[in-house]
């Protein structure tokens, strides 16, 4: 069992979650879920994390906020429910569906006498996340590509048209170009005459 760290050990994340709990507003980058056991939420969390990883910038899931009609209730996650969450199990389960390594930060956030479970999802590093295995119970299939809707009610869903796929690929292309530029800079630095001369002079000085 891997213990869940407290958010106060991560200053930036602590402040971000505090702000998100003050003004609750779901978006493509933020999703709130009511308090439930891990087994109840785990497949919905898989879909949401893959979707948030497929957008620009990071995404955050906060467990412990319930939707009641048009209002939100900050009820926190119960001690009974949070005991069912284990950092290693969560990362292993979510990662088993992702086509490449997915970076997650999982913390417990305490505020106003209530606890919340927070999952921060980093955007994909190189290629968009594609689901790599099936699970009938979770309605998850190999090849599914999830995104967060940008219009209407924020939700996690599969890509359903060419425009959405093109937008996702454009992000991947931008990342690829940025990597190539950095590689070029490193190579240029290695073969720069002045840099080579400095290294040569240093080697002579060591003799």
Image: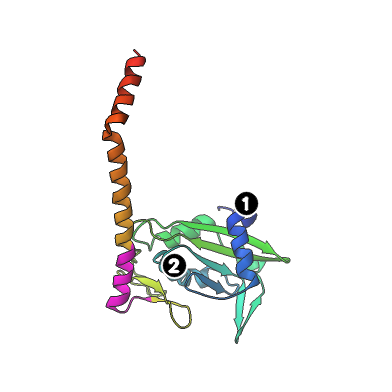
Badge 2 crowding class, 10 Å Cα cut-off, few under 14, some 14 to 19, many 20 or more, is many
Q: Which residue is mark 2?
A: 52
Would residue 22 be visible to someone looking at this image?
Answer: yes
**Dot 1 corresponds to which residue?**
9
* Badge 2 element: helix
Task: Choose top left, top right, bottom left or bottom right for residue 130.
Answer: bottom left
The residue positioned farthest toward the front in the image shown = 194
Q: List x then y, in percent, for residue 177.
A: 29, 55
The residue closer to the viewer here, 117 or 154, is 154
Over which residues does the magenta segment extend? 158-171
Q: CA distance from mark 1 to mark 2?
A: 23 Å
Residue 68 locus on image (x, y percent) = 62, 84
Circles 1 and 2: CB distance less than 8 Å? no
**Of 23 and 40, the residue lying toward us:** 23
Q: Earlier in the sequence, mark 1 or mark 2?
A: 1
Residue 56, quarter of picture: bottom left
For the residue labelled by badge 1, is the local secondary structure a helix, a strand or a loop? helix
Quadrant location of the C terminus in the rendered image: top left
Residue at (30% x, 66% y) in the render? 169
Q: Which secondary structure is most common in the magenta stretch?
A: helix
- Please check the rendered image and state whether residue 164 is part of the magenta-colored stretch, yes or no: yes
User: Measuring 39% from the left and 72% from the top, which residue is drawn there?
Assistant: 147
């Amino acid at each position: 069992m891997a213990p869940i760290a407290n958010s106060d050990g991560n200053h930036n994340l602590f402040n971000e979650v505090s702000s998100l709990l003050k003004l609750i507003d779901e978006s493509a980058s933020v999703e709130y879920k009511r308090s439930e056991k891990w087994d109840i939420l785990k497949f919905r969390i898989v879909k949401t994390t893959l979707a948030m990883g497929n957008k620009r910038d990071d995404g955050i899931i906060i467990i412990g906020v319930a939707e009641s009609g048009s209002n939100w209730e900050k009820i926190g996650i119960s001690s009974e429910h949070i005991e069912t969450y284990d950092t290693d199990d969560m990362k292993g389960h979510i990662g088993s569906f992702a086509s490449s390594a997915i970076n997650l930060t999982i913390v417990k956030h305490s505020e106003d006498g209530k606890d919340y479970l927070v999952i921060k999802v980093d955007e994909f590093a190189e290629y968009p996340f594609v689901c790599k295995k099936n699970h009938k119970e979770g309605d998850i299939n190999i090849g599914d590509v999830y995104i967060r809707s940008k219009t209407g009610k924020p939700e996690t869903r599969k890509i359903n048209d060419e425009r959405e796929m093109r937008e996702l690929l454009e992000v991947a292309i931008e990342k690829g170009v940025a990597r190539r530029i950095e590689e070029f800079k490193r190579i240029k630095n290695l073969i720069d005459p002045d840099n080579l001369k400095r290294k040569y002079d240093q080697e002579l000085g060591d003799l």
